Image: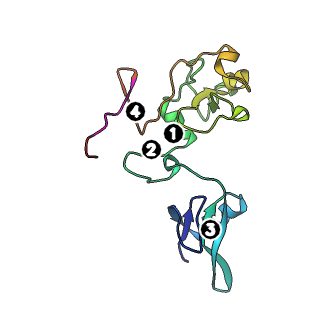
Amino acid sequence: MPQVRVYNLGYDPGTGIGELLHTTTVRHAMGMIRREVAVPVELTVVDERIVPLALELTRELSGAWVEGAGRRSVGFSYRAVHERDHWTCAYCGRSVSRAPACETLLATVDHILPVSRGGRSSWTNLVSACKGCNNRKADRTPAEAGMPLRFAPYDPAVSYRVGGHVEDLPVLLGA
């Protein structure tokens, strides 16, 4: 089976101009189409079946979301947010996990600025939170909920921790 090219939103099949994000299997591509994450833009027939050769995402993704998007890029996922935050709730400081001893310590990811208010899923707007704190904060900002963050979220692609403090990576001349 052929590999399917996955393009970011804005791909022009007429000219072939667009941002190629990665290639994937036909099976995964069909799942992306079913979930309405992508739409087929080039099709072919293989063994009497119509299969996609190229997909275009239904929304634009930044480079931080792309697997292998560059040496300085860090793969963005909810699990990566938990890893960055050391599986610790940003509100109460308790450890969270995928299989907790009690339901309130279930690992969730919280949008600091809620999505309903224009908050985006990004390194600096997401923190690891236990289910109890996430439910208590609900659709409010930490200030409105009276729940200050115990640590500030950061983008690991451009920052690093030094003695508990987050520092920007130095800009290298000529890089």
Could you tell which of marks 4 and 3 lies nearer the N-terminus? 3
Between marks 4 and 2 in the image, the one whose residue lies nearer the viewer:
4
Colouring: rainbow
Mark 4 and mark 1 in contact? Answer it, CB < 8 Å: no
Q: How many marks?
A: 4
What label sits on residue 153 in the rendered view? none
Q: Residue at x 70, y 22 (%)?
A: 137
The residue labelled by disc 3 is: 27
Mark 4 and mark 2 in contact? Answer it, CB < 8 Å: no
**Magenta stretch holds residue 167:** yes
**Magenta stretch holds residue 115:** no
Front position in the image: 45 or 88: 45
Other-residue count near label 2 (Cα within 10 Å), few / some / many at <14 / 14–19 / ≥20: some
Front position in the image: 98 or 115: 115
What's the amino acid at mark 3? Arg
What label sits on residue 80 in the rendered view? 1
Judge from the rendering whether residue 154 lies leftward or rightward of residue 147; answer left or right: left
Could you tell which of marks 3 and 2 lies nearer the N-terminus? 3
